[in-house]
Every structure is written in C-alpha cells, then in structure tokens.
C-alpha cells in the first residue's frame, strides 16, 4: 500500500526500512509492539500515519512484510485493529482468531498478546484511552465499575451494530484527512468521542453488556427537575448528557428515559431549546447595528450555524435575522 493510499496520509509519522527505527517510532504512538520480521530475508517497508484526539486516536499502519508482534501487557489504552487488506493471526490469552477485513480484533491492555501480520496487511487502529473509556462506561451505568472492561476478541464487522460504530470511525477519519472544522470545535469533538465510545460499548460484547442492555432504574421527577435546573443554569457551557447524568447521580440511559417519560423529550433536546430561547431573547432586544446573529449563537453553544438556523425557524417561525431586524 502506498503512502497516498494508506489512510490519514496528511498525518504521516514515519516511513522506514529499518526494523529498529520502526519499532521505536511505533512505540511512540502505540504500546511497545516487540516487532520482528517473520522471515529474515524479507525487507521491511514500514509506514505509519496517525492522529490523536483528546481521548481517542486513529493510526494507519503497514509493515510491508510479514511480521511477528509480541507486545508486553500495557495499561493505558484499548485498541481496535481493523485490517484494510490481507489477514492477521491474533492470539490473546486463550483466544485465537484470524482477523480479516470482515473481522476486526479488540485488543485488551492487560492480556498477553501475540500478532502475526501477513505481508499486504495494512490496518487502521482505533485507540481508546482506558481511563476515559472506563469513566464513560461508569457514566452510562450510573455507578462505579466493579472491575476492568473485558471485550470479546473478535468484532464482526458485518453486524449492523458494528457497521454503525465503523461509520463513526469513518467520519472521524474523513474529518482528520480533510482537516475538518468539526475536530477544531472542542464540544463537537467531545460529543463525537462520546458517541464512538458509547457505540463500541454497546456493539462489542463485554463483561458489562448485560448491565448495559438490562432494565435501568427509573428516574423520579425530582431528579429530572434537578437536571432541568442544571441545564438552565449552565446552558452556555459545553454540556453532554454524560455530564448532566453524572451531576444528578444517575446513568445516562436512566436520565434519558426519565426525560422521555416526564417531559416527552431528551436532555439534549431540552438543552437545545433552552439555548434557542436565550438566543431569541437576546435577538429580540438587540440592535442590528451592534449585534450579530453569529456572535449570539456562538455564545449560547451553537457551532453549526446552518443547523442552528433551521432549529430556530422551526421553534419560532422566523429566521434569527428576522427577529433581530424586528
């Protein structure tokens, strides 16, 4: 695979034929991979492109030869390795699989691992900060975790839930390749990473799957009221449903269920409407010569002006500019 065809080409980290250099360079982005050639007479042609976000990252890696990888257990992150071509043999603990373009592998930071990547086996790897993923899961459940997360090794990419997760990965990849504005907005990036983690936890079987898919405790009206008050008091700030749920002491699914039952809406829809009402109030008293719609919209947390204008018109029956003019 050429540099141009390997994903994330604008974020090249290295291209080398030297085994020691490849080993050192990979270790700077991924765990110590313990890299060696499967056959001594072959020539390494290693290249890696990578981009790191706040709590996750993407890495495209191709060794250009058959290699053996024996990393030591690491503690910092989970990795999902997605072959873009070819096959890889993966042995983790007592589990073994042959990973293909239809079967990714979810690599644990605590188990012994052996990998054999065939020649012509470039992979796209999605990295998750372990502490962030565990914290996110705790927020979803509304309680502290009783132990580490343990995923099933193989991810069937033909399943609809896995394809949904993969579509989020693809969106992040395309934004990174195009230097998209979404990744430059902290709130948008945070929501995207939250979605990436949520879908991984729901799509890939793990030891917390029964709790995630089971019946959630019902949220009483006073808890919903506290969440509403929190939203109204902090509406201009970057808020996620996980932030709100953690602040009122419940899980995200329980909070969403409470909002649906008691208010017939969702926490984020309620937050959007509060922000729209605040924008409308400012535009109503604003002076066209000294006030701009864009400034007010940004101040109240709207980063996508097209979506903001559509939502505003649906709620108030006129455009933001019309409100400001009149």
Image (tube, rainbow, N blue to C red):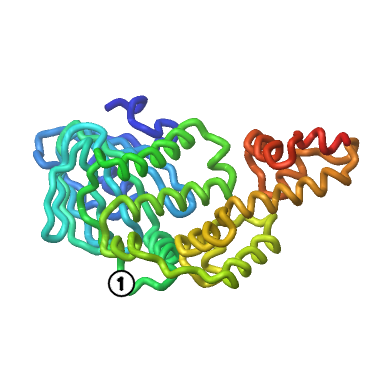
Q: Is residue 56 left or right of residue 88?
A: right
Q: Secondary structure at mark 1?
A: loop
Residue 27 visible at all: no
Residue, disc 1: 147
Q: Nearer the viewer, residue 147 or 178?
A: 147
Residue 88, picture quadrant: top left
Residue ID at (19%, 38%): 100
How far across and down, in percent of the image, does residue 116 sit?
14, 44
Residue 216 visible at all: yes
Residue ID at (77%, 45%): 296
Residue ID at (26%, 47%): 23
Which quadrant, please, contains the N terminus? top left
How far across and down, in percent of the image, does residue 131 sit?
40, 64
How far across and down, in percent of the image, does residue 26 sit?
31, 47
* Total number of numbered discs in the rendering: 1
Q: Is residue 232 left or right of residue 259?
A: right
Which quadrant, please, contains the C terminus? top right
How far across and down, in percent of the image, does residue 211 sit?
33, 65
Residue ID at (88%, 46%): 285
57, above or below 257, in the image: above
Q: Nearer the viewer, residue 260 or 19?
A: 260
Residue 239, picture quadrant: bottom right
Dot 1 alpha-carbon crowd within 10 angstroms: few under 14, some 14 to 19, many 20 or more: few
Q: Nearer the viewer, residue 73 or 40?
A: 73
């Amino acid at each position: 695979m050429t540099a141009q065809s390997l994903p994330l080409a604008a974020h090249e980290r290295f291209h080398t034929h030297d085994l020691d250099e490849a080993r050192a360079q990979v270790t700077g982005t991924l765990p110590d991979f313990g890299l060696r050639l499967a056959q001594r007479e072959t020539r390494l042609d290693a290249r890696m492109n990578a981009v790191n976000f706040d709590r996750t990252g993407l890495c495209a890696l191709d060794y250009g030869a058959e290699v053996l990888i024996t990393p030591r257990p690491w503690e910092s992150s989970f990795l999902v390795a997605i072959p873009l071509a070819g096959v890889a043999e993966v042995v983790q603990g007592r589990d073994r699989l042959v990973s293909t373009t239809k079967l990714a592998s979810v690599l644990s930071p605590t188990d012994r691992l052996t990998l054999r990547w065939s020649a012509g086996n470039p992979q796209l790897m999605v990295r998750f900060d372990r502490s962030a993923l565990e914290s996110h899961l705790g927020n979803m459940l509304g309680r502290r975790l009783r132990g580490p997360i343990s995923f099933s090794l193989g991810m069937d990419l033909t399943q609809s839930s896995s394809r949904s997760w993969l579509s989020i990965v693809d969106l992040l990849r395309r934004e990174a390749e195009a230097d998209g504005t979404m990744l430059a907005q902290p709130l948008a990036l945070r929501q995207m990473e939250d979605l990436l983690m949520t879908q991984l936890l729901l799509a890939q079987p793990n030891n917390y799957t029964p709790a995630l898919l089971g019946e959630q405790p019902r949220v009483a009206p006073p808890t919903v009221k506290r969440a509403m008050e929190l939203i109204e008091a902090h509406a201009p700030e970057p808020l996620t449903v996980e932030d709100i749920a953690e602040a009122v002491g419940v899980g995200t699914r329980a909070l969403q269920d409470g909002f649906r039952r008691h208010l017939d809406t969702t926490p984020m829809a309620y937050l959007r409407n509060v922000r729209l009402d605040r924008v409308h109030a400012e535009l109503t008293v604003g002076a066209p010569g000294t006030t701009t719609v864009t400034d007010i919209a940004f101040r109240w947390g709207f980063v996508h002006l097209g979506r903001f204008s559509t939502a505003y018109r649906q709620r108030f029956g006129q455009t933001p500019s019309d409100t400001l003019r009149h």
